[in-house]
Amino acid sequence: MDFARTARHLLTSQRTARRYFTARGLAAIKAAIAESETAHLGEIRFAIEAALHPAQLWHDVTPRERAVELFSELRVWDTEHNSGVLIYVLLADHAIEILADRGIHARVGGATWDAIAQTMQADFAAGRFEAGALGGIAAVSCELVACLPAKEGNPDELPNDVTLL
């Protein structure tokens, strides 16, 4: 167990998340997701978690493992075209994970998602949380448009709200 990591998680709260992601910023993220989904058949979910539970820290859960867990819990896989994408932010670890369902991941690949996450991380490190989130959504949307452009009858299959954990 990493004591420095544990201390960061114990000191990072929902209040911290609300300081970085204001109500206005969360509304902008939701609107960006809704707007982007009119251009492709993908579904984007955005989840922000301030810190992991102590039991998760005890078991050394990585940000990637937690993102996989949330991918299932948030039902990102539950889309007609297997086109869900989760953008997961774990504030205490300064980590961003982007996971795509098999219908998209096979076409785009992990290197692209990692590059988008790194760009977001650079914005976050500079204190530009809203800009980083919106840039990440735009970049993911660009990939989705290239793979699965919108067609007539494009349903909105998953909620566009930001999930705060």
Image (cartoon, rainbow, N blue to C red):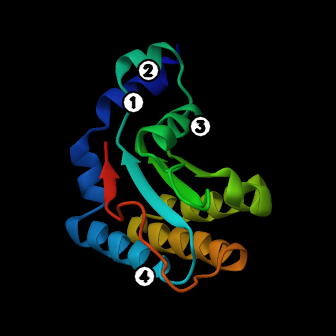
Callout 2 touching callout 1 (CB < 8 Å): yes
Give the labeled residue for mark 2: 56
The location of residue 91, given as percent across then percent down, is 42, 45
Q: Amino acid at mark 3?
A: Arg
Give the labeled residue for mark 3: 64
Q: Is residue 152 left or right of residue 159?
A: right
Q: Compute the Cα span from label 4 to label 3.
A: 27 Å
The location of residue 85, given as percent across then percent down, is 56, 57
Local packing at callout 4 (Cα closer than 10 Å; few below 14, some 14-19, many 20+) is: some
Q: Compute the Cα span from label 2 to label 1.
A: 6 Å
Q: Is residue 130 left or right of residue 61?
A: left
The furthest residue to the front: 153
Residue mark closest to the camera, 4 vs 2: 4
Indicate the secondary structure of the residue bearing disc 1: loop
Identify the image quadrant of residue 50.
top left
Q: Earlier in the sequence, mark 1 or mark 3?
A: 1
Identify the image quadrant of residue 40.
bottom right
Q: Earlier in the sequence, mark 4 or mark 1?
A: 4
Q: Nearer the viewer, residue 60 or 128?
A: 60
Q: Nearer the viewer, residue 60 or 157?
A: 157
Q: Earlier in the sequence, mark 2 or mark 3?
A: 2
Residue 23 position (above or below residue 15): below
Q: Which mark is residue 35?
A: 4
Q: Amino acid at mark 2?
A: Gln
Q: Residue at x 64, y 81 (%)?
A: 149
Give the labeled residue for mark 1: 52
Q: Amino acid at mark 4?
A: Glu
Indicate the secondary structure of the residue bearing disc 4: helix
Residue mark closest to the camera, 4 vs 1: 4
The location of residue 156, given as percent across then percent down, is 41, 70
